[in-house]
């Protein structure tokens, strides 16, 4: 079992704690390491609806046949989604997976979304409608997606998909669109369910 750890507090060093990824400092596209807003460890990674980390790891390593994606997330506003848009924790532009928030209205909050971009999607049953820290985990074994929120299985949904994108994957958006607005910590992808 291996993990592709995207943010590792053990390597936090004056804002250089991003492993397996890059961001564009010249255009202010890098999320900010904030040592006063972390769920675990030294710092949380703050996104402001324009920041993104471009993952530089081999795309195949980011699309295992069996996977668990997990992260601690804290949103800045209780609903991330204006009409007809999603807000991605991690995604790719086409044919790969996307994990993020999707909701029908600001009143209900948002569900957790697993999608094969351009093909189909499934959502958690539970709505998240606050700005508290939540541990989000999504597993996929090739036929079933399972959603876990704060350590409790929310739902299991049939989702027979194989992810096969050309990449690159990002954290904090879908390519350069549908940005996450909030703080993330302990972001990891595992090749097990």
Image (cartoon, helix red, strand yellow):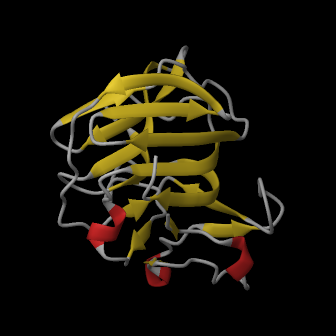
Could you tell whether 45 is left or right of 157 in the image?
right
Identified at 37% across, 77% down, the residue is 57
Residue lying farthest to the right in this orientation:
36
Depth check: give the residue in front, 119 or 138.
138
Quick check: 3 left or right of 168? Answer: right
Classify 83 as above or below 5: above
Q: Residue 79: which quarter of the image?
A: top right
Q: Position of residue 134 (x, y in %)?
A: 67, 38
- Of residues 38 and 186, the one drawn nearer to the viewer in this rendering: 186
Percent from the top left, x then y, of residue 69? Answer: 48, 50
Q: Residue at x 31, y 76 (%)?
A: 58
> Horizontal and vertical percent for residue 48?
56, 55
Q: In the drawing, does residue 1 fall left or right of residue 33?
A: left
* Image: 120 above or below 47: above
As drawn, 129 above or below 71:
above
Q: Residue at x 34, y 47 (%)?
A: 98
Q: Residue furthest top?
A: 107
């Amino acid at each position: 079992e291996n993990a592709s750890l995207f943010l590792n507090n053990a390597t936090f060093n004056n804002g250089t704690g991003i492993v397996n990824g890059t961001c564009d400092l010249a255009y202010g596209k890098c999320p900010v390491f904030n040592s006063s807003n972390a769920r675990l460890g030294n710092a949380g990674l703050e996104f402001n609806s324009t920041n993104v980390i471009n993952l530089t790891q081999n795309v195949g390593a980011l699309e295992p046949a069996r996977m668990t994606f997990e992260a601690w997330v804290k949103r800045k506003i209780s609903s991330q989604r204006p009409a007809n848009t999603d807000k991605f924790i991690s995604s790719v532009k086409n044919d790969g997976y996307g994990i993020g928030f999707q909701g029908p209205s600001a009143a209900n909050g948002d569900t957790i979304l697993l999608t094969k971009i351009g093909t189909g999607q499934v959502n958690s049953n539970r709505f998240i409608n606050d700005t508290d820290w939540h541990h989000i985990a999504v597993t996929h074994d090739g036929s079933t997606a399972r959603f876990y929120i704060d350590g409790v299985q929310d739902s299991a949904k049939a989702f027979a998909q194989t992810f096969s994108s050309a990449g690159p994957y990002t954290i904090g958006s879908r390519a350069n669109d549908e940005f996450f607005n909030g703080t993330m910590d302990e972001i990891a992808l595992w090749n097990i369910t």
